[in-house]
Image (cartoon, coloured by chain):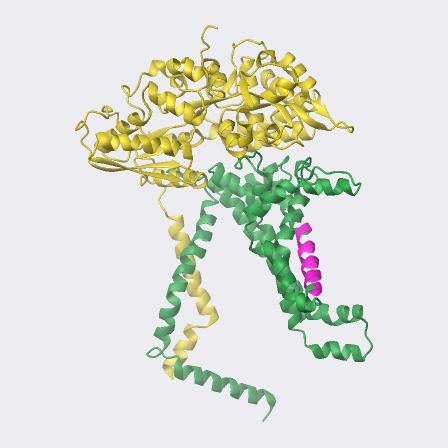
Amino acid sequence: MTDNKRISNQNTRKVKYLGSHWTWGGKIWVMLLAIIPLVISFLLFWIYPIAATFVFSFSDWQAFSNTRQFLGVNNYIQAFNDPIFIRSLTNTFSFVALYLPLIIIGGLGLALLVDAAGRLKELFRMIYFIPVVTSVIATAFVWRYLYQPRIGIINILLQALHLPPQRWLLDPSQALFSVVLYTAWQSVGLNMVWFLAGLTTIDQTYYDAAKVDGANSWQTFRHITLPLLMPTFAFVTVIGAINAFQVFGPIYIMTSTGISSGDSPPGGPSNSTMVVVLYQWLTAFRELNLGYGAAMGIILLVIILALTLIQMRLFRTRWE
Amino acid sequence: MRKDINFRRTITRRDFLKVASIAAGGTLLSACGSKTTPAEPVVPNTPIAAEPNQAGALSYKGTLDVWDWEFPVREELVKEYIAQWEGKQPDIKINYVALPWADIETKLLAVATAKNGPPISDVFYFWRYDLQRANVIVPFPDDFADWDDRLSTPFMKDENGKIRGFPSGWYTDMVYYNKDIFEQEGLKAEDIPTNWDDFIKLSQQLTQTDQNGNITRAGCAMNDYWQHEYLWQGLIYQQGGWMYNEDATAALWNEEPSVRALQFIQDWYLKHKIDSRDLPEGYGGFCNDMAVMFLGAGWNTGFFMNDFPQMEDRWDTVKIPTFSGKATPSYGIASPEENYQAFNYFPDETVEASFAFIKHLMVGEDRANRWATAQSCAPDSKKVGADPKIMSIPGIKSQAETMPFRVCFGERPIEAEKLWRTMFDQVILEGKTPAAALGEATQAINQVLPTKKRYITERNYQPPAE
């Protein structure tokens, strides 16, 4: 018997085995009963909102108005002629480009350090994970004061090191990076955990073999650790990019002006931190222009979907 | 076996996708087909608000839900008045709910426009116009109050002359000053000039810098988005200008009064250097002795007294200066602290009871006085505003004495907010010329302003004789 035939026979047996159990009169109803609530909730809370958003994006729907008119693709045309939306798109891509290397390199670096920390491993892992489980509102607010040009501790430290103080969130050329730095600090602990998990999946025998072959630490890292962490890189990159494309909270908190009036318009200075989700929120929920806001959401959805597919394809090629 | 084959065919991935697509398509179609219900013509009720102390005058019996947002001093006052009400109207209970500030706007607008909200709610002036456009709030009855005594009356009228708002008070901008530093500098409140030119000179004298020229103590701080917005608008009115054309279809921000007002704000930071954006925002600098004076609206009082209790007895206020040094054409803008509204999707007797309760909360000299004192704002009453008791309260007197010379522009087009924010950043942080920044903002707002009816009331302002 050839190998192909043997495999074919095995498959046939599997099908028969499944077939004998999964009959219409048997356990199928249990299965259907089990999945129907999930399917309904999926349709209701995932598919319907996306479909509704898609439909609304072709209308002039103003929130709390009883009427809406079909506009065709006007909202999409308006978006690509809206300088603030274009700025928000550019800022979003800049945010992703600055954020991803920080969380990937930072996460991997921390994971390697923590992994080598011996008995203190769990302590360090906990310390670096604390920002992940702390409220974004609280930590972003604290960072806003760390960045304060006159009384913020970051500038005080810079001056102590004889370095020039910066304006951070008040400088249009630094504000986005300042928010990226905070966001990376806030999320790098989670990436560290993913990389730590990835490191534990690498079989020790590879390292033992490398040692026997006389490989040094860099060669071991370059030729064993990095290639075998490729699935983790893929995961961290895709999830990190999706999160970065949807960044909202840190920018809202850190760029809303006023001590008492934290709800003054965020995204400044001069729209330098205006990202797509923030602009979408401003348009849809502050200006109540839901139709236009929905169009922005769909544009972002398409961008994230396309880039995620590209990333997955690239990484699949690498690790296969 | 046959069943097996059928089953396997039924659950192939392709078939599953087919079913899923049909379901999604159906959902999509149902969304497409959802009715765009035209606004139902709702005839506003104009019930006669009964005197709350006339037991039995109201036909409604039951519980009235009243929504508000969290603000401890107001909640305390309302609860006190509810206790009085329930003593006089035992058949009408009040269910008072204070929602978080972050939630109430969306919740209220959503439920009210679905005609499923409470019969009464406190409504902030930013959102009142959306409720008015959605035709869900009832105009105030003609006999509800002494409209001639109300400072808000000209600014609260709709296109039919009906009163649509009953503010619990007014916030205006004024000059807060640090009494301790003034004493150290040998200054008194009377030394604060009433015109901008001299005010800037005094602020320059009080400003301190370090060896690098950085401001360490501002002569007069504002450094807050809201104050930039208030001052810019106020300065337009101080020059006798307007922000919008007569039918509110176009902004006049690129005209001379507006450009001059923005130039004034840019000079404040960049030319006169009496304030710095690098200092702590808003009253943060003032309360940390990093500013001698602070330009702010009255609502700051409550916040900084809460955040910086050490400021107790260390501050007082004077009226905001004007270009002319006089009250006319205007001291600038005033923003109403909005009020309780009754909703029209209830039976007439519910609306009647709602207005009776709102009247119980708001109407009368005692009420105007209490609301103003609790919220640190000017009362919405000519009589009460001139009361020596009110005029002796720091933070309220400077607002109250300028109130007759204040303009309320009515609706604040929310689409303008991001444009103003950008405009202030551009001129203060990047040194862009005010004319250029205003040119861009005007062009942008004029594209959206005519897209819906706006309730701009600035031109109802009539300054009294000085």
Q: How many marks?
A: 0
Measured as percent of width and height from the top left, residue A218 is found at 79, 68
Query: Which residue sits at x=36%, y=47%?
Result: B34
Q: Is residue B267 left or right of residue B36?
A: right
Identify the colour of chain B in the image.
yellow
Q: In the displayed image of the protein, which residue is found farthest to the bottom?
A: A1
Q: Is residue A195 left or right of residue B39?
A: right
Image position of B142 with respect to A185: above or below: above
Q: Is residue A48 left or right of residue A173?
A: left
Q: Is residue A32 visible in the rendered structure shown here?
A: yes
Q: Is residue A101 magenta?
A: yes
Measured as percent of width and height from the top left, residue B236 is found at 56, 17
Q: In the displayed image of the protein, which residue is found farthest to the top?
A: B465
Measured as percent of width and height from the top left, residue A267 is found at 59, 39
Q: Is residue A310 visible in the rendered structure shown here?
A: no
Q: Nearer the viewer, residue B309 or A185?
A: B309
Image position of A284 with respect to A106: above or below: above
Q: Nearer the viewer, residue B151 or B249?
A: B151
Tell me the quarter of the picture where residue B336 sits: top left
- Extent of the magenta region: A98-113
Query: Which residue sits at x=42%, y=55%?
Result: A45
Image position of A234 with respect to B244: above or below: below
Tell me the quarter of the picture where residue A150 sits: top right
Prevailing secondary structure of the magenta residues: helix
- The green one among the chains is A
Measured as percent of width and height from the top left, residue A92 is found at 62, 47
Tell me the quarter of the picture where residue A270 sits: top right
Q: Nearer the viewer, residue B61 or B265?
A: B61
